[in-house]
Image: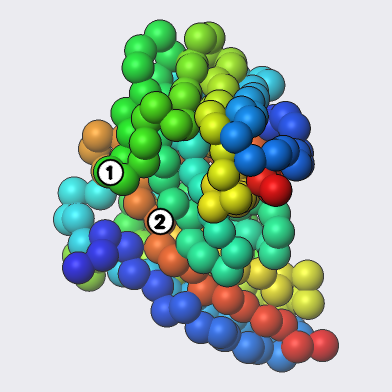
Amino acid sequence: QKEVEQNSGPLSVPEGAIASLNCTYSDRVSQSFFWYRQYSGKSPELIMSIYSNGDKEDGRFTAQLNKASQYVSLLIRDSQPSDSATYLCAVRNTGNQFYFGTGTSLTVIP
Amino acid sequence: GAVVSQHPSWVICKSGTSVKIECRSLDFQATTMFWYRQFPKQSLMLMATSNEGSKATYEQGVEKDKFLINHASLTLSTLTVTSAHPEDSSFYICSSFTSGPYEQYFGPGTRLTVT
């Protein structure tokens, strides 16, 4: 079983819709959870971090964490074509090791 | 977020030569830096974890004698690809880890092409 699992997609949404990206992780004692955005040919960029159960909002982005279900998600409201990218979920454990999912490819259709 | 730079951004070298890639954390001190490799349309692959002042920890399958990592200061880590071969052509990305927020920030990456 992989440490972090994501649906590879591709996920397509129309412009203005809500994009929902999901991630599950296997280590129950994981400490921190992150979402990175990676445009084609570029390096990943940190867009959200979340540490406790519940929702965390930053602009059009909302990260949701449910430790009991070992599940973390990212919602993108009012999706824009510029949001088209691969989204990586990452988890940090108590030893400061990071595990990345393989990424979900998102396409926002104008 | 924190700023991490990499140099060079791209490099072309001949087979058998060595290439050094620098990674700098510009606005914070990074006790730990990570080195990743990413092939086209594939996911990130962690190569090694570099801690300031100590030897790097390499992931299984990564040749430490081929990929030399030096983390001489809290703001600089270098990766040297020795005796490069065409199969080493890839996108190499470093990242810096900050304690406190426990976040990892990536450099812009170095695209290596070995001919």
Chain name for mark 1:
B
What number is the disc on residue A14? none
Q: Residue at x 70, y 64 (%)?
A: A40
Disc 1 marks a residue whose amino acid type is Gln
Q: CA distance from mark 2 to mark 1?
A: 16 Å
Q: Residue at x 51, y 65 (%)?
A: B42
State whether residue B17 is above or below residue B54: below
Q: Quadrant of residue A10?
A: bottom right
Q: Residue at x 75, y 88 (%)?
A: A109
Tell me if B111 is positioned left or right of B106 in this view. right
Q: Nearer the viewer, residue B35 or A71?
A: B35
**Residue reaching furthest to the front:** B16
Residue A31 percent across, percent down from the top left: 29, 45
Q: Position of residue A8 (x, y in %)?
A: 47, 78
Residue B89 seen in the figure: yes
- Name the chain under label 2: A
Instruction: Tell me the element at label 1.
Output: loop
Frontmost of labels 2 and 1 is 1
Q: Which residue is mark 1?
A: B60
User: Are the two marked residues, 2 and 1, in contact with CB atoms closer than 8 angstroms?
Assistant: no
Label 2 residue SS: strand
**Residue A39 percent across, percent down from the top left:** 69, 62
**Residue tagged 2:** A100
Q: Quadrant of residue B22?
A: top right
Badge 2 crowding class, 10 Å Cα cut-off, few under 14, some 14 to 19, many 20 or more, is many
Amino acid at the residue labelled 2: Phe
Crowdedness near tag 1: few (<14), some (14–19) or many (≥20) residues, C-alpha within 10 Å: few
B40 to the left or right of B102? right
In the image: residue B36, left or right of residue B57: right
Which quarter of the figure is the N terminus of chain B placed in?
top right
Q: Is residue B108 above or below residue B24?
A: below
